[in-house]
Image (cartoon, grey):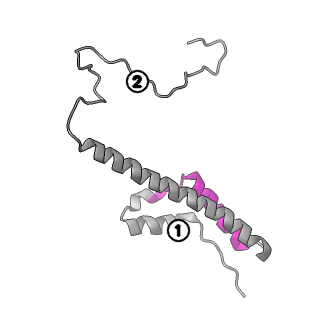
């Protein structure tokens, strides 16, 4: 009886990208950590003892669910921005000019203050 040999995730990425009509997206998608982890688990399951396969595949399914959740969140984000951009025009929130004529101060990138890694650097 021959054993199943897992072909690795590049083959699946190329197939998926071709099916979606975006073959150029296969290479960058190789850097998605959850997909790489899932592929590693699938490869392990292909070679594992029968008693270990179900547990390994269950962990791989967790990664699949994370990827599916991220895909859905991406779809929701895009739809929300597209819908918001189609609403009545108003002041451009990305504009660097305040409606009262002055320049807007730059918005903070996050709620955290950037800390230097070097304790001597106080800037």
N-term mark: 1 or 2: 1
Q: Callout 1: few (<14), some (14-19), or many (20+) C-alpha neighbours within 10 Å?
A: few
* Label drawn at residue 107: 2
Count the labels in the image: 2
**Which region of the structure is painted magenta?**
26-47
Residue at (40, 54) in percent of width and height: 75
Q: Nearer the viewer, residue 47 or 114?
A: 114
Residue at (72, 71) in percent of width and height: 54
Q: Which residue is mark 1?
A: 11
Secondary structure beneath label 1:
helix
Residue at (70, 70) in percent of width and height: 45
Task: Please identify the dominant SS of the magenta region.
Answer: helix
Tell whether 77 sits left or right of 91. right
**Coordinates of residue 106 in the picture (x, y in percent):** 38, 21
Q: Is residue 40 magenta?
A: yes
Q: CB atoms at circles 1 and 2 under 8 Å apart?
A: no
**122, above or below 3, in the image:** above
Res 113 quadrant in image: top right
Q: Nearer the viewer, residue 57 or 99?
A: 99
């Amino acid at each position: 009886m021959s054993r199943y040999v897992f072909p690795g995730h590049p083959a699946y990425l190329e197939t998926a990208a071709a099916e979606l009509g975006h073959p150029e997206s296969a290479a960058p998608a190789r850097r998605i950590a959850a997909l790489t982890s899932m592929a590693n688990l699938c490869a392990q399951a292909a070679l594992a003892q029968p008693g270990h396969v179900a547990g390994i595949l269950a962990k791989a399914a967790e990664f699949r669910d994370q990827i599916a959740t991220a895909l859905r969140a991406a779809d929701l984000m895009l739809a929300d921005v597209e819908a918001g951009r189609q609403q009545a025009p108003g002041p451009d929130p990305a504009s660097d000019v305040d409606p009262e004529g002055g320049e807007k101060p730059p918005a903070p990138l996050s709620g955290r203050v950037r800390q230097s890694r070097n304790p001597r650097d106080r800037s």
